[in-house]
Image (cartoon, grey):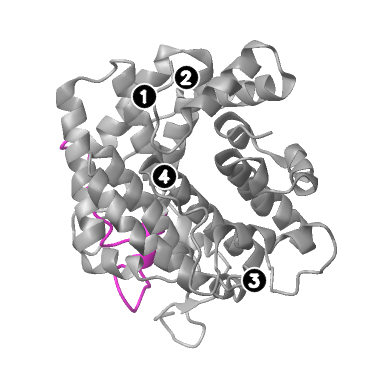
Amino acid sequence: MVPDYIYYNREHIQTIQQQVSAGNKIYVTAVNNYEKAAQNDLTLPIESVLNKPTAGPSGNKQDYLSLAPYFWPNPDTVDGLPWINKDGQVNPMTRGKHTDQARSSNFLKALKILTLAYTYTNNSKYLQRMKSYIDTWMVNPETRMNPHLNYAQGWPGTNSGTSFGVIEWTGISNVVTAMQLLQATNTVDKRFTAQVNAWLNDYLTWLLTSELGNLERTRKNNHGSWYDYQVVGLMMYLNKKAQAKSYLAETRQRIEEQFQPDGSQPHELKRTKSVNYTSMNLQALLQVAFLAEKLGENLWYFEGSQGQSLPKAIKYFYPYLRGDKTWQHKQIWKTVEQAYKLKTYPMLHIARAHFGKSAVADDIYHKVKPTLSAEDLLLYYAK
């Protein structure tokens, strides 16, 4: 039994389950990969925000702490402060055990791994493991994270936290999905569910009312788009559907502001990893458009005042993927072609899964299939 997930298409997952049962090698291999990952996760300790050696600026270890990944010590000052920005270049110092970024990333990724592994194997051990993760991070008063990101992606020497840290919790969607599965399988009781929902409601309130949350809401790039992905999905899960439907006006405005009539994305094209960010931003908006459909709203065919739209943003990539044009924007991460394969093609697969064959041209989509990850295969069914 597949729940009526907020962030995913139940019918698509059921179709994929049929492919697995029929022995379709591509899907069976994907399931085996997730089974191995889930089995490995069962052997690992569950780390919480308490595992950092010292608390952040607040003095409370239960406050989430991270550093901006593209900031580095200043070579022109004795103490290296204030750190300076090197766009697209991840400072390994921001990914150590002294921050919570890796721990929270592991937590959120583990929920997806376990959800998928259970979906295709029905191994109840994965359900109990998911419950343990969520209990550690959101329920147990001794280990739970406080539901805010006031100290996320700080810039040493400048501030203790920025709005940009919100993107580190895009995987809150995995918590929503996991909770839907845990409730559908009667793995959690009403009290546990109420405690998790209270945490999620407090986090949503922080997103909507705090200074940093509202700053992220105003970002005119992928940060704003992934903010919407979190907010709309949380509203839907918490039975605030009228509020979610009303909020979609913000996403329409993003399509108006972020895209040119030809489908290009100026805010993302100026980045040092332009393929990554144009693909990532578009993927966020496609996912919000999918959520909007569940609310009876059509963002897929929405057009801005100059004709800006999601279909045009997808078609913008076509000449480059077909080899008719050469990508002229900066791309410091892998080659442009490798970035297409790892970032652009999965986004196109999601578009085709959500919005049908008309969303992505056949000659483009046929290039996509060999590049799909196990996750793409097991969550999004497209022909």
At mark 2, the secondary structure is helix
What's the CA distance linking mark 3 and mark 1? Answer: 41 Å
Residue 306 as seen in the image, left or right of residue 29? left
Residue 155 occupies quadrant = bottom left
Sequence-wise, the earlier of marks 1 and 4 is 1
Q: Amino acid at mark 1?
A: Leu
What's the CA distance linking mark 4 and mark 2? Answer: 24 Å
What's the CA distance linking mark 3 and mark 4? Answer: 25 Å
Residue at the image position 49 percent from the left and 77 percent from the top: 85
User: Relative to residue 30, is residue 301 depicted above or below?
Assistant: below
Give, as a single range, the part of the protein colored magenta.
141-167
Q: Amino acid at mark 4?
A: Leu
Residue corresponding to mark 2 = 118
Q: Which mark is residue 262?
A: 3
Query: Where does the C terminus fall, quadrant-wise?
Result: top right
User: Relative to residue 24, is residue 100 depicted above or below?
Assistant: below
Q: Which mark is residue 291?
A: 4
At mark 1, the secondary structure is helix
Callout 1: 10 Å neighbours few (<14), some, many (20+)? many
What's the CA distance linking mark 2 and mark 3? Answer: 42 Å
Residue corresponding to mark 1 = 181
User: Relative to residue 288, is residue 45 depicted above or below?
Assistant: above
| 146 falls in the magenta region | yes
Q: Amino acid at mark 2?
A: Tyr
